[in-house]
Amino acid sequence: MPKPSYPLFEYLSKINDVSCRHYQLAYDGEWHIDFGSLEEVLAAGAKGVIVVHPNNPTGSYVKVEEGRTIVNLLTAHPSALIVDEVFHSFPIGDADRRAGTFAGTEEILTFTVNGLSKLVALPQMKLAWIVLSGPRDLVKTALERLEIIADTFLSVGAPVQHAVHEILAQQQLFTSRVLERVVNNYDELRRMVGVDSPLTVLRCEGGWSAMVRLPASRSDEAWALHFLEAQGVLTHPGYLFDCDINACLVLSLLPEPEVFSEGVLRIRSAVSA
Ligand SMILES: Cc1ncc(COP(=O)(O)O)c(C=O)c1O
């Protein structure tokens, strides 16, 4: 699984007796997959590779050329590809080099995951899906196994099964409003931080959060506690997402615009002080 990324993957793997190793995402003005580290985990015998497209919290999409390299590597070291696309419908900025959905990838066994949780911000509906694709015999075996697993967890709730048609019919309307919110808040964040600033806004290409690097005079946790206690601003320290960059915070792009700007203003003044 990627590092940094969504923290629950590791816990969820462990309670399912799956041991996990990380490959790195590296930042040099934009995020890249460090393919050396991915090759290492494949050489060590990884059975599956998780890709988050775009990743949480880095907001980085897999690029077209990275997608090709992933498929080639997983063809050479046979391993399943699991692609989490829950934020795929929330792109920020220029889209030219981003890979499209992995659903339908033919060359390798691919599980492409999405659901109502982010698409219409209804995590409590507990409705998600997996699109399975790849070589026919592998897909057939995987489907048989998934059927047992699905049966073991019992059926999807009847209310949401009945409502899903109606919910998905309104999805576009909802997604476009959230997208407008996150795009505007990200632009505002960059505008407010400006260029000659002790803060750096990392490049974000999509999703619901942005990462900001602060002076390394405090740790990410110390900054987050300071903002919370002294400024009343809630941020997430990067270490929660296994982020190795010093003093990096994750900010939600979802708040109302006035609340978001006020939060950034307080962070900016606290750092200058
Ligand atoms: C990348 C990613 N995948 C999955 C989830 C969880 O989705 P669900 O609510 O469908 O379990 C999250 C939640 O934040 C997430 O960030």
Image (cartoon, rainbow, N blue to C red):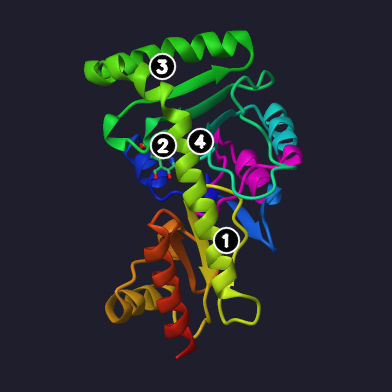
Location of mark 4 (residue):
84
Tell me, yes or no, if residue 236 can be seen here. Answer: no
Determine whether the beta carbon of the residue marked 4 sits less than 8 angstroms from the nearest atom of ligand 1: yes
Left or right: 125 as drawn, with respect to 119: left
The amino acid on which the numbered mark 1 sits, given as a three-letter code, is Asp
Q: Where is mark 2, residue-wise? A: 18
Q: Quadrant of the C terminus?
A: bottom left
Residue 60 located within the stretch drawn in magenta = yes
Does residue 62 lie above or below 149 as drawn?
below
Label for residue 213? none
Q: Which residue is mark 1?
A: 187
Determine which residue is flagged by label 3: 146
> Circles 3 and 2: CB distance less than 8 Å?
no
Q: Nearer the viewer, mark 4 or mark 2?
A: 4
Question: Counting residues from the N terminus, which is met first, the one under dot 4 or under dot 3?
Answer: 4
The alpha-carbon separation of the residues under discs 1 and 4 comes to 26 Å
Q: Quadrant of residue 220?
A: bottom left
Asked whether, in this view, residue 13 is left or right of residue 180, the answer is left
Q: Nearer the viewer, residue 171 or 56?
A: 171
Q: Are marks 3 and 1 in contact (CB under 8 Å)?
A: no
Residue 148: quarter of image: top left
Quarter of the rendered structure image containing ligand 1: top left
Disc with the residue nearer the chain's start (2 vs 1): 2
Kindly identify the residue that appears in the image at 44 percent across and 76 percent down: 265
**Region in magenta:** 37-66
Is residue 223 at least partly visible in the picture? Answer: yes
Amino acid type, label 3:
Leu
